[in-house]
Amino acid sequence: MPLVCTRGDQPLEDSRWRRATADLPRLSAPVHCRFQDLPRTGTWKIKRLEIARLLASGELPTLSPARTGA
């Protein structure tokens, strides 16, 4: 599941998502989160496994899901 963080927590434009993923297999609609809500290590690396666990349990705070227009 794609996860996006945007400057100022602004919604992701459909056209930008399509351009960014044009050469990839079709992806699910991205989940829009605030960067400061993502779990990180002491050296600021993103904890991807922790994010997956939080998403599965519904514990990760999310903004409105970005639309892909598909």
Image (cartoon, grey):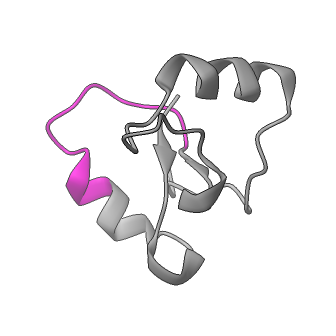
Q: Is residue 17 left or right of residue 3?
A: left
Indicate the quadrant where residue 60 lies.
top right
Q: Is residue 60 left or right of residue 31?
A: right
Q: Is residue 45 magenta?
A: no
* Residue in view at x 36 percent, y 30 percent: 26
Q: Nearer the viewer, residue 66 or 45?
A: 45
Q: Position of residue 5 (x, y in %)?
A: 49, 60
Q: Position of residue 53 (x, y in %)?
A: 70, 17
Q: Nearer the viewer, residue 33 or 30?
A: 33
Q: Is residue 66 above or below residue 41?
A: below
Q: Is residue 46 left or right of residue 35?
A: left
Overall secondary structure of the magenta stretch?
loop
* Residue in view at x 48 percent, y 25 percent: 48
* Residue in view at x 48 percent, y 69 percent: 12
Q: Which residues are magenta?
A: 18-29
Q: Is residue 65 left or right of residue 1?
A: right
Q: Is residue 35 above or below residue 44?
A: below
Q: Position of residue 31 (x, y in %)?
A: 61, 46
Indicate the quadrant where residue 15 lies.
bottom left
